[in-house]
């Protein structure tokens, strides 16, 4: 396993058929990462993530006992430091939005190249959002419409709503500042207020709150 002295990225696989899992095990070994566990069901995914504390959960959208979105949400509620990436054949806008609202760091189609997938896993482990603009267009009309409910119910100002929407689109503080003409420090201060109003402490938890609002 290649290594530059850093600890390997620990990956938990959730879902996928046997041939796919074998392929993932094979090329993951070409980078400084290791597969620490494999699950097929939601309870197994939640329990194993809590026990093994992987850096990244690589998950299929459709699981034998339900939706990967449900598993993602439950994993992050109990272990908010874990990063979740979806790898799926399901090219569907509702599924993409649901995964983002559940707190996932990325949504990738399973025709992605192996090198690009490994890059995505490494970037997710480093805390970067992995949103492919080809399959998750920024400023989706549906995303904007649904986010209005959150702003109204949570008492967010118009500017706070704009900032939270950009967070939901995977933008960094720097990118948000550039889009709205704000300094990075100002964006950080706004986010602190937004998180306080939503009663959360990090971006993935804010996404979970999005899910709770729009599902009402």
Image: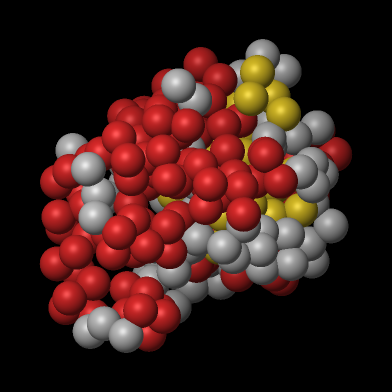
Q: Quadrant of residue 115?
A: bottom right
Residue 38 horizontal side relative to residue 150, left or right: right
Residue drawn at x 62%, y 57% is: 140
Examine the rendered structure and indicate whether residue 96 appears above or below residue 112: above
Residue drawn at x 68%, y 39% is: 94
Examine the rendered structure and indicate whether residue 170 appears above or below residue 150: below
Q: Quadrant of residue 113?
A: bottom right
Q: How far from the left and from the top, in percent, is residue 17?
A: 80, 32
Q: Nearer the viewer, residue 153 or 86?
A: 153
Residue drawn at x 49%, y 72% is: 3
Quadrant for the C terminus, please. top left
Q: How far from the left and from the top, in percent, is residue 61?
A: 68, 35
Q: Is residue 183 visible?
A: yes
Residue drawn at x 62%, y 54% is: 141
Q: Is residue 30 visible?
A: no
Q: Nearer the viewer, residue 207 or 162?
A: 162
Q: How many marks?
A: 0
Q: Nearer the viewer, residue 166 or 145?
A: 145
Quadrant for the N terminus, please. bottom right
Q: Quadrant of residue 197?
A: top left
Q: How is the image coloured?
A: secondary structure
Q: How far from the left and from the top, in percent, is residue 131?
A: 59, 62
Residue 170 horizontal side relative to residue 130, left or right: left
Q: How far from the left and from the top, in percent, is residue 108?
A: 69, 55
């Amino acid at each position: 396993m290649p290594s530059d002295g850093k600890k390997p990225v620990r990956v938990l696989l959730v879902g996928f058929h046997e041939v796919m899992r074998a392929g993932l095990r094979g090329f993951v070994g070409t980078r400084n990462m290791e597969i620490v566990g494999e699950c097929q069901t939601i309870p197994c995914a939640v329990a194993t993530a809590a026990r093994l504390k992987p850096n990244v959960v690589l998950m299929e959208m459709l699981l034998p006992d339900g939706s990967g979105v449900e598993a993602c949400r439950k994993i992050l509620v109990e272990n908010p430091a874990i990063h979740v990436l979806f790898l799926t054949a399901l090219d569907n806008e509702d599924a993409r939005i649901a995964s983002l609202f559940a707190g996932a760091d990325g949504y990738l189609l399973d025709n992605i190249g192996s090198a690009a997938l490994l890059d995505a896993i490494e970037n997710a482990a480093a805390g970067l959002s992995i949103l492919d603009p080809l399959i998750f267009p920024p400023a989706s009309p549906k995303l904007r419409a649904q986010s209005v409910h959150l702003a109204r119910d949570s008492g967010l100002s118009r500017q706070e709503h704009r900032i939270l929407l950009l967070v939901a689109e995977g933008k960094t503080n720097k990118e948000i500042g550039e889009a709205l003409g704000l300094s990075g420090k100002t964006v950080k201060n706004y986010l602190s207020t937004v998180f306080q109003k939503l009663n959360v402490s990090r971006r993935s938890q804010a996404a979970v709150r999005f899910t709770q609002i729009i599902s009402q």
